[in-house]
Image (cartoon, grey):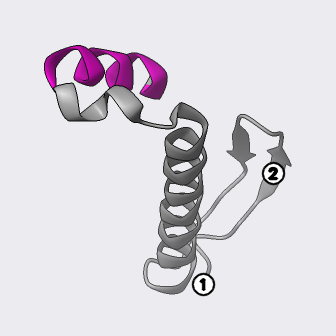
Amino acid sequence: MRRLIIDVAKRHFKELEKLNMNAVLGHTAQKSKQLEERLEDYLVRMLGFGRGCQVVDRNYKITWKTFLQE
């Protein structure tokens, strides 16, 4: 999805013709991972949700059995 958005932006903005696609994708993936980690920390610390059971792969994270802690 990110690659498609960058390709469309390249067509509209001439300044982006020399853009390094791999660098941009790497940067956006890193930012996305940081945001997901911050959201998870917020849910655990501020809202009292437990981490539950998790399966983490390169492209996704599945979490189940997350109940409010007492």
Quarter where residue 22 is shown = top right
Residue 17 in the figure: left or right of residue 53? left
Q: Measuring from the top left, give residue 9's x and y in whole percent.
A: 24, 24
41 in magenta: no
Residue 3 in the figure: left or right of residue 69? left
Q: Quadrant of the C terminus?
A: bottom right
Residue type, numbered disc 2: Gln
Looking at the rendering, the stretch of residues picked out in magenta corresponds to: 2-13
| Viewer-nearest of discs 1 and 2 | 2
Quarter where residue 52 is shown = bottom right
Residue identified by numbered label 2:
54
- The answer to whether 19 is drawn above or below residue 13 in the figure is below
What numbered label is drawn on residue 1?
none
**CB contact under 8 Å: marks 1 and 2:** no
Q: Secondary structure at mark 1?
A: loop
Gap between marks 1 and 2, in whole Å? 20 Å
